[in-house]
Image (cartoon, helix red, strand yellow):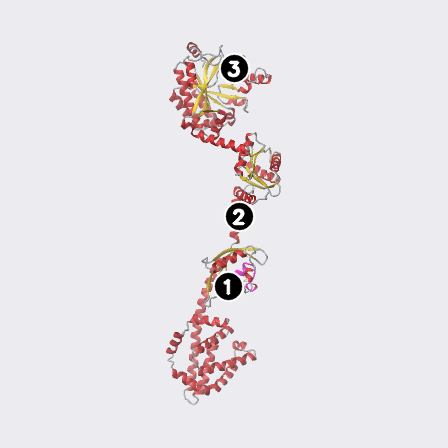
């Protein structure tokens, strides 16, 4: 079967069909008479042919190459018998398709056993020489023709050798180019006859596995048997899909076992085609892609892990969250929760010790967090100084709190870095992945809980609750409404009287402008919306509006007869940090006509604590304009006394928390007295806030306060109500009076405000 297939393949290659055979006969001037003459002489020539065969094999024994093929006597006897039949058919015919096929088959056998063409043609020359001698024994030129015959066949062997050598060289050149290309591409070649399950692989294919080509079997089992078990089904599926015409070619990656047992990543490419007999063959290349796979794995790892701590990052967290949620949705899984961890005041470490130390702290924090986890828990670095712990398989919600408490205790232990000893704390928000059978946005829920822990004082944990969600939703709605309140004209200014205490009763010397927000019919409390304005940054635009409105209103009151009136306005640190704040304030004063000395800007201790050069420069510019600066709520923050001398302050305001206990709280009396005395000793005017009864007023007057404000002296009221007071349509709300115009002029002449 195999020989027949190869013979048919040869016929296709040389295109030896009937037309080709007929053309060759015409060129040789072959006629029917030629066949008839040969057939008539066949019987007569048979003995001579038998004799020639004997002489031929004896002659071949004198040459090394043919004799090496003729060592077995049984083979020689069989060949002699076939040779006689072969020559007999040359005379007797018939010269049909079977004749042509038989001649080709003989040539194929000779090629397969390694008999070179020169021996084949030389034997024909000797044969014809013997046959001519038999046919023309008495002819005088028989010897001459024999010599000519030998010369012709010698030339024929040379010509045929030239043809063959040229073809072989072209083939070798082509194979060399192909081999160089393969070496450059680092590919191995394979050829698989599917029907016969015969596999050929190149040396390079085998060397990828640390094997020689001889060590690879000749069937597909030697290939597929080495494929990683996890990858084999997909490889077979890819091959089948190509056979079925679903893909233009085979293109698939898989792992294959090497000689040492390790697995190599390879890319196989191939194309299948049907042979003439309808059977499939597939051939292609195989490339070692292990290096690119390692790079791919490294990049994939880098995309999912933090380079500083080596922890998984947010991308990996998202994957793990989805995996756990999918398992929980199937039912039967234990509880799972998420811890959102944020280091407290980590920016202070970076700013004071540098980012290099900050990075070392983060690495140590990551190590400590890992030490606190249970088997199966996962730790992620979320970004900056934020970490996420994913707790899986919780027995109860209390397990998450116990892990959180363990983390807080471990982090609080002293951290030794070079010459520094640091105490690191963190706040933790806890949220379940599911709550009451519903899937939560766990990251958002834990972040809300973290915010509550921060608000409660840091270094603690807080759990997510529906109530917290409601509060946050309300805050979001508040932020959205606040963002539009200025454009909608919903803000109002109220004014609280500030009284001088150097006469009895106290007299009005100024007002503090206080922002109010009227949302529909509701007046929103300042403590509810002012912090939101601060966090959102809207305080900058709203603060500028407050300044302009307050300056315009107070200037109008001055022009209406209250020439001594001053205006106090609270200034946010965000406003003061704006590069254009001072120029804008100058524009407002110029636009409204309010003298700079009539404006008091109130700042907080937290602003002084920032102690940056830009803030100091801005405050000194303001002081140079004549604007008064007041330190508000003194005593409630952490300002060192040095700040009072460092910054150009004019007024010190005693916070109402120190006034509220007077006169019954002896400790508060002592603190208030000390603050008032400190301000006076530094040459500052002192103002007391939160005066709510006559005893408190008497105390601050007795201690030497210059100014006071509070509900006892007057509540904040609208500009219209203040205007009625100035117009004499209403009396003062508290025990104070308007300063007469004459007294005002006298005060001005003495240099007092």
Label 2, on which residue? Answer: 298
Residue 126: within the magenta?
A: no
Q: Position of residue 520 (x, y in %)?
A: 44, 26
Q: CA distance from mark 3 to mark 1?
A: 104 Å
Name the image quarter holding residue 638: top right
Number of the front mark, 1 or 2: 1
> Reading the chain from its start, which is encountered first: label 2 or label 3?
2
* Disc 3 target residue: 705
Cβ atoms under marks 2 and 3 closer than 8 Å:
no
Residue 186 is at least partly visible in this image: no
Task: List x then y, in percent, for residue 252.
Answer: 50, 56
Total marks drawn? 3
* Residue at disc 3, secondary structure: loop
Dot 2 alpha-carbon crowd within 10 angstroms: few under 14, some 14 to 19, many 20 or more: few
Looking at the rendered structure, the secondary structure element under dot 2 is helix
- Report if the CB atoms under discs 1 and 2 are less than 8 Å apart: no
**Which residue is painted at 49% across and 32% down in the image?**
473
Q: CA distance from mark 1 to mark 2?
A: 35 Å
- The residue labelled by disc 1 is 192
Tag nearer the camera, 3 or 1: 1
Q: Please rate how many residues cluster around mark 3, counting C-alpha atoms within 10 Å: few if below 14, some from 14 to 19, many from 20.
A: many
Q: Please identify the quarter of the rendering in which residue 521 is found.
A: top left
């Amino acid at each position: 079967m195999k020989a027949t297939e190869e013979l048919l393949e040869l016929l296709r290659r040389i295109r030896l069909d009937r037309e080709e055979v007929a053309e060759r006969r015409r060129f040789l001037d072959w006629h029917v008479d030629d066949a008839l003459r040969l057939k008539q002489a066949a019987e007569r020539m048979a003995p001579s042919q038998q004799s020639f065969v004997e002489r031929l094999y004896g002659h071949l024994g004198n040459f090394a190459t043919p004799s090496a093929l003729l060592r077995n006597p049984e083979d020689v006897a069989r060949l002699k018998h076939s040779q006689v039949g072969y020559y007999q058919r040359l005379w007797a015919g018939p010269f049909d398709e079977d004749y042509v096929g038989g001649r080709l088959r003989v040539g194929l056998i000779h090629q397969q056993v390694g008999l070179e063409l020169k021996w084949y043609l030389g034997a024909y020359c000797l044969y014809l020489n013997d046959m001519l001698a038999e046919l023309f024994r008495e002819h005088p030129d028989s010897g001459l023709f024999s010599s000519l015959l030998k010369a012709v066949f010698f030339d024929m062997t040379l010509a045929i050798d030239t043809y063959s050598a040229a073809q072989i060289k072209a083939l070798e050149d082509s194979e060399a180019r192909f081999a160089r290309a393969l070496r450059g591409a680092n590919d191995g070649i394979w050829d698989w006859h599917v029907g016969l399950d015969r596999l050929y692989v190149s040396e390079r294919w085998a060397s990828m596995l640390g094997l020689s080509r001889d060590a690879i079997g000749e069937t597909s089992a030697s290939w597929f048997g080495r494929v990683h078990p996890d990858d084999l089904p997909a490889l077979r599926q890819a091959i089948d899909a190509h056979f079925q015409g679903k893909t233009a070619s085979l293109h698939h990656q898989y792992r294959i076992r090497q000689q040492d047992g390790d697995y190599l990543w390879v890319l196989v490419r191939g194309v299948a085609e049907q042979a003439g007999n309808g059977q499939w063959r597939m051939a292609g290349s195989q490339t070692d892609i292990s290096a690119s796979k390692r790079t791919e794995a490294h990049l994939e790892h880098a995309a999912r892990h933090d380079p500083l701590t080596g922890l998984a990052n947010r991308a990996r967290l998202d994957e793990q969250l989805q995996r756990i949620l999918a398992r929980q949705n199937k039912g039967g899984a234990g509880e799972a929760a998420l811890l959102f961890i944020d280091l407290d005041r980590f920016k202070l470490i970076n700013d004071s010790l540098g980012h290099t130390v900050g990075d070392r702290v983060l690495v140590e924090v990551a190590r400590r967090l890992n030490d606190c986890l249970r088997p199966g828990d996962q730790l992620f670095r979320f970004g900056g100084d934020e970490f996420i712990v994913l707790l899986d398989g919780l027995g109860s919600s209390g397990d998450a709190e116990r892990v959180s408490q363990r983390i807080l205790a471990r982090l609080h232990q002293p951290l030794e870095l070079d010459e520094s000893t640091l105490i690191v704390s963190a706040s933790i928000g806890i949220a379940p992945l599911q709550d009451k059978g519903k899937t939560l946005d766990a990251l958002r829920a834990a972040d809300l809980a973290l915010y509550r822990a921060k608000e409660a004082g840091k270094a603690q944990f807080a759990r997510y609750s529906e109530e917290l969600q409601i509060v946050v939703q309300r805050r979001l709605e508040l932020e959205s409404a606040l963002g539009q309140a200025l454009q909608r004209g919903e803000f109002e200014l109220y004014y609280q009287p500030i009284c001088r205490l150097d006469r009895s009763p106290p007299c009005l010397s100024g007002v503090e402008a206080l922002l109010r927000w009227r949302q529909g019919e509701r007046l929103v409390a300042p403590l509810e919306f002012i912090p939101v304005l601060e966090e959102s940054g809207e305080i900058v635009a709203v603060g500028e509006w407050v300044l302009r409105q307050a300056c315009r209103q107070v200037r109008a009151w001055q022009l209406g007869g209250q020439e001594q009136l001053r205006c106090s306005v609270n200034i946010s640190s965000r406003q003061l940090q704006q590069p254009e704040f001072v120029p804008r304030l100058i524009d407002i004063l110029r636009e409204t006509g309010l003298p700079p000395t009539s404006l008091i800007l109130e700042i907080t201790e937290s602003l002084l604590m920032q102690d940056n050069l830009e803030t100091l420069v801005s405050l000194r510019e303001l002081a140079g304009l004549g604007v008064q600066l007041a330190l508000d709520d003194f005593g409630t923050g952490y300002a060192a006394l040095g700040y009072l001398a460092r910054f150009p302050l004019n007024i010190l305001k005693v916070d109402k928390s120190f006034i509220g206990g007077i006169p019954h709280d002896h400790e508060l009396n002592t603190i208030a007295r000390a603050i008032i005395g400190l301000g006076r000793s530094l040459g500052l005017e002192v103002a007391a806030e939160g005066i709510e009864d006559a005893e408190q007023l008497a105390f601050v007057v007795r201690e030497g306060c210059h100014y006071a404000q509070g509900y006892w002296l007057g509540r904040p009221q609208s500009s219209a109500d203040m205007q009625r007071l100035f117009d004499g349509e209403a009396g003062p709300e508290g025990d104070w009076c308007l300063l007469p115009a004459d007294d005002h002029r006298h005060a001005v002449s003495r240099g007092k405000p």
